[in-house]
Image (cartoon, rainbow, N blue to C red):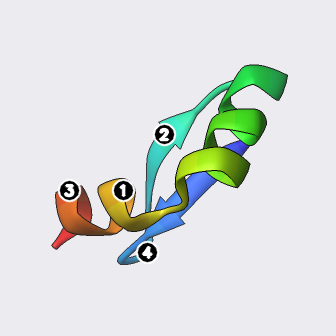
Amino acid sequence: VHVLAAGRIVASGGPELAHQLEAEGYDKYVMEAA
């Protein structure tokens, strides 16, 4: 799983990252990329 924000990969991981994204959302990663 890769998370892209502002045209960059800001996180990569396996199934645990997918579950975290489902539970917590993407806001953390969007703020980091801004």
- Residue identified by numbered label 1: 29
Q: Quadrant of the C terminus?
A: bottom left
Three-letter residue code for mark 3 = Glu
**Cα–Cα gap, marks 2 and 1:** 8 Å
Q: Residue at x 65, y 47 (%)?
A: 23
Three-letter residue code for mark 4 = Gly
What label sits on residue 7 in the rendered view?
Answer: 4
Of badges 4 and 2, nearer the viewer stands: 2
* Contact (Cβ within 8 Å) of mark 2 with mark 1: yes
- Residue identified by numbered label 3: 32
| Mark 4 / mark 3, whichever is N-terminal | 4
Three-letter residue code for mark 1 = Tyr
What label sits on residue 11 in the rendered view?
Answer: 2
Q: Residue at x 42, y 69 (%)?
A: 5
Residue neighbourhood size for the residue with mark 3, other residues' Cα within 10 Å, grouped as few (<14), some (14–19), many (≥20): few
**Cα–Cα gap, marks 2 and 3:** 10 Å
Side of 1 where 9 appears, left or right: left
- Asked if residue 5 is positioned above or below residue 15 in the image, the reply reads below
**Cα–Cα gap, marks 1 and 4:** 12 Å
Query: Residue 9 appears at what percent x and percent y?
Result: 48, 52
